[in-house]
Amino acid sequence: MIGAMSELGPFRINSDGKTLFRNNYAWTNVANMLFLESPAGVGFSYSNTTSDYDNAGDKNTADDAYIFIVNWLERFPQYKTRDFYITGESYAGHYVPQLAYTILLNNKKTNQTIINIKGIAIGNAWIDDETSEKGMYDYWWSHAINSDATHDAIYKYCNFVNDSSTGMCQDSTDKAWDEMGNIDIYNIYAPICLNPDQRNASGTGSINVFDPCWQYLLISYLNDSSVQEAFHVRPTSWDVCSDVLTRWNDSAVTILPIIKYLIANGQRLWVFSGDTDARVPITSSRYSINTLNLPIETAWRPWYLNKEVGGYLEAYKGLLLITVRGAGHTVPSYQPQRALALFSSFLGGTLPPPS
């Protein structure tokens, strides 16, 4: 629901937390969108088998999502032959490639195209533990969030490859978080929600200004009984983060082998990144992709929208790295027009214009 109601869906929530306004740059303008809350227990989703919550992890999430899509296509067979793409952000750097991999494997096992998958796009995506950790701390230092001394200590005491880092590593990373101060790590240049109770409760939202109190708006709106009834969901105490999943049983340390598999099997693969996100920053994406040693087909260059630089890109054999200028972790929230232009280019299999 976060993606649908605060990023790329057709509507956003007004600052009264009760009404909606239209998102003119919704991705539904160019594609049929299916929003999936996953794994079970997230958002309005649930399982009738409580052990599912105890067994949550990467593999079960991919398997359950695959079963859902197959059953959905059986329910709506007119979409079976359509081109199918998967997008996601953050830890969807695991979810999306793993689901695509599961789809391809099952297509091969059955020797038929059960799901006509053509590609994936992942934004500010956690792909590989080692390079993502390094990229995060390097971004903090290079954007004047951390001191030289703290950054040097992290590299001196921390082992990014496994869990054998010292207590000095924990002290150093704690210091890094302390030095950051009270900013939004998901968009380091955005205002923060100082007092949600004093927000403009009668104001109308703007698609060009993302409300820093968006979480409180979502909670207020999605817990309205009439809204839940309209969504045909089970009455739920909705929250931004679910506490149903008590533990995560399996998390791959790297998704890079799956990325290689997807490339080898002809999938379109875009890795996009809002360049003001400090949680899974552009440096993490660059470090992760660089380990693949892919040949460069289009050298680093800006891309444009409305005569302004929308971001930067570099095309490799089988993969595109592309940034969105001025966007945070949830790219369409902060730069909806640029995000739609990027998504449209992705679907068309063309690079955004160089001028």
Image (cartoon, rainbow, N blue to C red):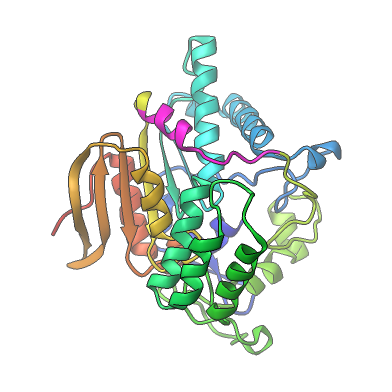
Magenta-span inclusion, residue 38: no
- Percent position of residue 314, x then y: 25, 49
Q: Is residue 330 visible?
A: no
Q: Is residue 327 above or below residue 242?
A: below
Task: Count the marks.
Answer: 0
Q: Furthest-left residue in view?
A: 355
Which residue is rendered at x = 18% and y = 56% of the image? Answer: 301
Q: Quadrant of the N terminus?
A: bottom right
Magenta-span inclusion, residue 258: yes
Q: Furthest-top residue in view?
A: 111
Give the magenta-colored segment's residue range: 250-263
Q: Quadrant of the C terminus?
A: bottom left
- Percent position of residue 110, x then y: 54, 10
| In front of the other: 72 or 261 | 261
Q: Is residue 329 left or right of residue 178?
A: left
- Percent position of residue 304, x then y: 21, 61
Which residue is rendered at x = 60% and y = 63% of the image? Answer: 169
- Percent position of residue 291, x then y: 37, 42
The part of the image, by quadrant, that contains residue 148 is bottom left
| In front of the other: 61 or 68 | 61
Q: Is residue 225 left or right of residue 118?
A: right
Q: Is residue 182 left or right of residue 189?
A: right
Q: Is residue 301 visible?
A: yes
Which residue is rendered at x = 60% and y = 29% of the image? Answer: 66
Q: Is residue 121 above or below residue 98?
A: below
Which residue is rendered at x = 69% and y = 33% of the image? Answer: 60
| In front of the other: 236 or 315 | 315
Q: Is residue 275 left or right of residue 314?
A: right
The part of the image, by quadrant, that contains residue 48 is top right
Q: Is residue 156 above or below residue 207?
A: above
